[in-house]
Image (cartoon, grey):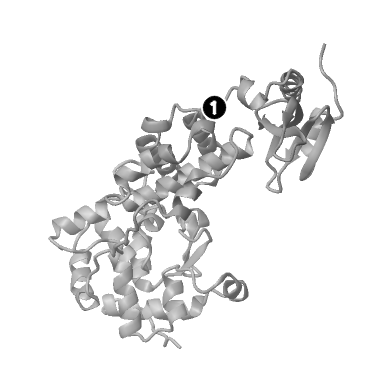
Amino acid sequence: MALTGKLTKRLVENLGPGRHGDGNGLYLVVDPSGARRWIVRVVVKGQKNKKGAPLRTDFGLGGADIVTLNQARERALEYRRMAKQGLNPRFNAAREIPTFEEIAQQVHIDRMPTWKNAKHGAQWINTLRDYAFPKMGRMPVDSIDQPEVLMCLSPIWTEKHETARRLAQRIKIVLDVAKSKGFRSGENPVTAIKEAQVLPKVKAKPKHHKAMAWQDVPAFYADLKSRNAMAAKTLMFTCLTGSRTGEVLGMRWDEIDAEARLWTCPAVRMKTGVDHRVPLTDEMLSIIEPLRAMQSEYVFEGQKRHKPLSNMSMLMLLRRMKVDGVTVHGFRSTFRDWASEVANAPREVAEMSLAHTIGSNVERAYARSDLLEKRRALMERWSEFVAPQTAGNLSEVK
């Protein structure tokens, strides 16, 4: 016979935040975040708490997305029977606790729609796969505590500190999710390790992309312009726009408005997660317009039809040109130095040209303009400096 109570499947799916009773000590707990989990409250016969009152305890039965209403009722009945016999369910109940790896894989799947791209999603799970799964992946998630977390973090904490820091964040997320589903209780061990300062402090060394001096760019650009390779054209455009590699390589023709002289890079490729408008100069258009004849989906097509150029192509070109100590990303820094030292551009104009986030959340809420026309004037001056023989009309940056 099926067990009955006050709740229904529809209520379980739709009830708002709070604790909702089904009867006989079973409750559905809905967190403000929307997470739903089951708990059962029992009184263990013959056992007292510290104050001498009957021992009344809440036990997690699992998340409502995993444990059905009928399963929760059956588990609650099992707990009540043990409590009536004087047995504490905490030590006597046989629960199916998932492993750390099982929870981590589910978290990865659940968050897949939120990743900016497949690469970021793969990096998230691969960090756990390489450093956490071998040491505690098969352990029940409720048995993981500080010693297990330290086994993962300690070996790489100083040598690969940035990786270790990200690993700690991801372990914490997995354990928090496990707790929200009723499979854990108590403080997150990652938080406890951080607050107790168990691991040594590591002074992070800032990594800067090696950049070309702005004085050397015109000669370098002239050399690029003498080459016919797609990588050369792509690097020319990247240098002129100050854009990130992924933004340029993924550029499609429908993002370009030649009449308005604009390229709108969609949010999905932007580090800031918002659309970014790039003003196009005559020199920029002279690079991309001839490429329309290829009739490709991408502006800068690679060796495979309708596929973008490889993200290593421009770096390999720099090596073939024997341009040492310079990275593709470094041209953003080169442009920024020139904008400050030569063009005397206002900080917000230069930073917006690089699609950097400026100011606090409040400041950004009121600064609704992307200063397009001021940025257009700045990019015209940059094009004139880099390729003076073909630059368009200039405007003064104010």
Residue shown at the point (47%, 46%) measured from the top left: 190
Looking at the rendering, in which quadrant would you find the N terminus? Answer: top right
> Which x, y percent locates residue 134?
36, 31
| Picture layout, residue 101 above or below residue 317 | above
Residue, far top: 1
Please tell me which residue lies in front, 348 or 131.
Answer: 131
> Which x, y percent locates residue 141?
52, 32
| Picture layout, residue 112 above or below residue 372 | above
Please tell me which residue lies in front, 294 or 264.
Answer: 264
Residue shown at the point (46%, 73%) measured from the top left: 352
Q: Is residue 318 left or right of residue 169?
A: left
| Picture layout, residue 278 above or below residue 251 | below
Total numbered circles? 1
Q: Is residue 116 visible?
A: no
Quarter location, residue 342: bottom left
> Which x, y percent locates residue 24?
83, 27
Looking at the rendering, in which quadrant would you find the C terminus? Answer: bottom left
The kind of residue on which mark 1 rests is Pro
Q: Is residue 15 left or right of residue 88?
A: right
How packed is label 1: few (under 14 Cα within 10 Å), some, or many (20 or more)? some
Residue, far right: 6
Quarter location, residue 49: top right
Residue, far left: 322
Q: Is residue 142 visible?
A: yes
Q: Secondary structure at mark 1?
A: loop
Please tell me which residue lies in front, 270 or 206.
Answer: 206
Please tell me which residue lies in front, 274 or 198.
Answer: 198
User: Would you name the residue on which mark 1 appears?
Assistant: 98
Residue shown at the point (20%, 53%) measured from the top left: 316
Residue shown at the point (39%, 42%) measured from the top left: 150
Q: Is residue 198 left or right of residue 364?
A: left
> Which x, y percent locates residue 261?
46, 70
